[in-house]
Image (cartoon, rainbow, N blue to C red):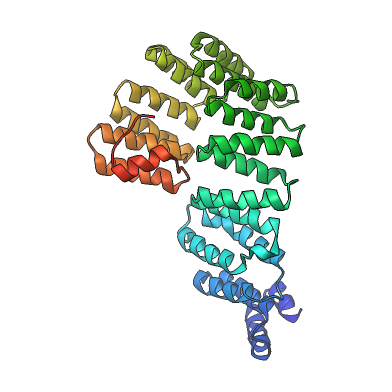
Amino acid sequence: VIADYFLHTNQVAKASIYLDQVLEINPKNGEAQLMLADIALRSNDLTKSLGHLEKGFAEDDVSIGRKINLIKGLEPYAFSANPDAEQLREGLGKLYTIIYDESLENDTLHYSYGIFLRELGEGKKAVDQFEKVTLLNPDNYNAWRQLLFMDYELERFDRMASNGEKAIEVFPAQPDMYLLTAIGYLETQQFDKAEEWLFLGQDLVVNDIGLKAEFVHQKGRLESKKGNYEKALDLYNEARKIDPQNGNVYLSITETLLQLGNSEEAMKLVNNALTEAPTNAYLMYAKAKIFFHDKKYERTINQIENALIYNVDPQFHELKGDAHFQQGEKDKALEEWKKAKETGRDTQLLNKKINDQQYYEK
């Protein structure tokens, strides 16, 4: 209490002296270590602060909830463009190692650790944590969403479909669970099941233009995968009218038009959309896909670099690597493919490109 008073009244030197005395009497006082960590951080001594945090986190007088909240408070700085970010990421990883204990059966711990691992680009490890949360606390809506999103990112579409059905059992009135389940079945070519979940979920959407458009968008993707390209384009255009800012809809239109051999129309559409939304990274990505299709690899790279200013999506790095490879720049290609993996893309195709140092079409 005395040290806390000194800190709150900005008498840092007195607080530090008092806390040193406390630790002489009781070296296992975790709260004192946390206060010293605070003092060190105020003095911009991150190394010393993390050292105190490690000692404090090892003690039982600090609750697991407080430890998790302290890590979460520092995480934004660990994943931002600041000079201490790398050191923070390493330090926070050590703190999680200290407090991680499966026998606690603490769903908050597993969820927070999963988010941290996801941000590190450790997708498969993050999935393990989110799966643990859904077992410990099936009512954790955010954990199911994270699990399904990670299934999608890792292209574990069979798991995505089965996990989605489990989520629907717990949240039968949440339309996004139906949408994600349908995508899982769509990507595994189980079109009847995909259509069924899209049909069941679309009427649950209330006052959410983006989600409503996404259901129509996925119905279009279903038709495209069946080879019904004109019907798919009609549905994409319907989705575009509902939500003109959905870059993924333009990407799907672009891919379909390219399949039909109409890159000129695809470019015209994307350019018109970029006039309305010039900072939309996914529209830039769609434009880069057109350049790549037309074998304009330098323009592909330039367009991806523009997209990366607004969104660091791993698939952007992968396409940039593909373009470098096609230009004979294998070292640059490998560098971009590795960046894609480091930022969270861990697919079988990407890993094959990295391992073989070779471009493969999807």
Q: Which residue is at the front of the view, 1 or 241?
A: 241
51 w.r.t. 130: above or below: below
Residue drawn at x 52%, y 66% is 91
Residue 29, image x, y percentages: 68, 81
Residue furthest out toward the top: 230
| Extreme residue in the left direction | 328
| Residue at (41, 16) in percent of width and height | 259
- Residue 140 horizontal/vertical position (percent): 72, 47
What residue is shown at x 66% (from left), y 89% (from top)?
A: 21
Q: Quadrant of residue 221?
A: top right
Is 124 placed above or below 300 here?
A: below
Q: Position of residue 250 (x, y in %)?
A: 50, 21
One can see residue 80 in this view: no
Residue 308 to residue 294: above or below: below
Which quadrant: the N terminus?
bottom right
Q: Where's residue 333, x and y in %?
A: 30, 40
